Image (cartoon, grey):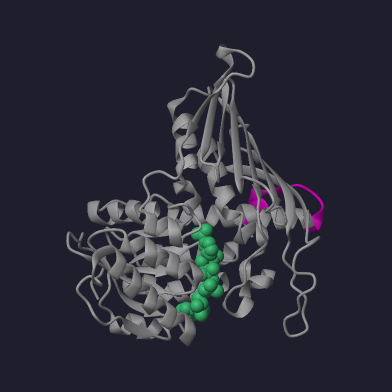
Amino acid sequence: MSRAGDVPDRTLRYAIVGSGMMGREHIHALAAIPDCEVVAICDPDPESLEQGCRAVARSWDSNRGQHGGKSEIARFGKVHELVAAGGFDVAVVATPNYTHRSVVEPLLNAGVHLLIEKPLCTTVQDCKDLISLERRTAVSHKVVWVGLEYRYMAPTMRLLEHVSSGVLGRLHMLAIREHRFPFLPKVGDWNRFSNNTGGTLVEKCCHFFDLMRLVLRSEPSRVFASGAQDVNHLDETYDGRVPDILDNALVIVDFENGARASLDLCMFAEATKNEQEISVVGSLGKAEALVTEGLVRLGLRANGWFQCDEDHVGHGAVPSSVLEHGAHHGSSWRQHLAMQHAIRSGTTATVSTQDGLMSVAMGEAAHRSISLGRAVRMSEVLSS
Ligand SMILES: NC(=O)c1ccc[n+]([C@@H]2O[C@H](COP(=O)([O-])OP(=O)(O)OC[C@H]3O[C@@H](n4cnc5c(N)ncnc54)[C@H](O)[C@@H]3O)[C@@H](O)[C@H]2O)c1
């Protein structure tokens, strides 16, 4: 196996660890990028393993007429076997959240580049332990990237451009609404229990807490939340147990720079137009992104009341094969392009394990706030 020390200018060889729904979305995204190939898949579930191999064959056939020149993909049931066999430069970890820590540890020790699906881990403590191991095993030019890919949705990227241009003045308020469908079925239904996922505000909402830090360029100081499981999965049982995953919540976050942000999450609200609506307001104006419709609005107070420009950003220039297979409007594909740029140019990850830790910590603080019925300081969560 090549360790990450050399910056490769040749074809990047990928191993997919976990070839369920998200692992296969990564396969489709990678197939649309030149100079990379999937050489190995690791999954203990024979059906997922088979589907992963078929996804590689189909995607490479349709995109390039061949599977990167290779006919056989190496198959493994355990990550230790994959690591022992080697022969890859980058591993994509798309296993259930509660396995991230144990799956990532041998890969960090192996010194390969890593894309770890969100959430980095299910608890702050596990995230911290992985970050310590990342430091101990540091190899120059190694990229360890956390898959907080909502940063790479085209309308959100345009919103971020407006923010960084300074036209909005000093930022004071950010509101994120996600109104969507319930959690989908998973292999072994691992996502029905908070112990496996970290809880909805970690599992799902780490994306939004990451966006809050990115937009406001500040760290969170305090979190207050209210939420419950009111509608979804209450009629399901698994080995006699009813799922315990929260399906709606309101979360308010204070930031060190004085800005405040809110999250409005509802997971029984698919009868709507936009899955995500993001609005950011500064002293000089407001920008908003309607993510499913691909609309971005920018209004400046100097131009008067109820005036704003509206841009149809769509999903950007995403290959149709990627749009067909991923429900993330091309963000997985853009994330891989950005990560490969970091690998090839010898720079560090844009979305780091520290970002992964903070997004989990904000979710953990929100869950703690719900159970304690009071605001929770980030220091309470980060120091424990
Ligand atoms: N970026 C996003 O927006 C996004 C969207 C969905 C899921 N995810 C994340 O992707 C990860 C996978 O989710 P999914 O929806 O694909 O779940 P899934 O259940 O569809 O697939 C998970 C796969 O991992 C396999 N697996 C379990 N333990 C393993 C191990 N130790 N080693 C190798 N493989 C193992 C399972 O057999 C299964 O095939 C989760 O962390 C999830 O939170 C991210």
Q: Position of residue 276 (x, y in %)?
A: 60, 46
Q: Is residue 361 left or right of residue 148?
A: right
Q: Is residue 120 visible?
A: no
Q: Is residue 199 left or right of residue 26?
A: right
Residue appearing at x 59%, y 21% in the figure: 283
**Picture quadrant where residue 36 is located:** bottom left
**Is residue 22 part of the magenta span, yes or no?**
no
Of residue 174 and residue 6, the one placed in the foreground of this image is 174
Q: Which range of residues does the magenta coloring cover?
A: 371-381
Q: Is residue 277 left or right of residue 159?
A: right
- Compared to residue 39, the image places residue 199 above or below, namely above
Q: Is residue 36 left or right of residue 162?
A: left
Q: Position of residue 163 (x, y in %)?
A: 49, 31
Of residue 6 and residue 169, the one placed in the foreground of this image is 169
Residue appearing at x 82%, y 52% in the figure: 373
Q: Quadrant of the N terminus?
A: bottom left
Q: Position of residue 106 (x, y in %)?
A: 40, 76
**Is residue 379 part of the magenta span, yes or no?**
yes
**Picture quadrant where residue 11 is located:** bottom left
Residue appearing at x 54%, y 45% in the figure: 211
Total numbered labels placed on residues in the image: 0
Q: Is residue 306 visible?
A: yes
- Residue with the most extreme left position: 9
- Compared to residue 137, the image places residue 297 above or below, namely above
Q: Quadrant of the C terminus?
A: bottom right
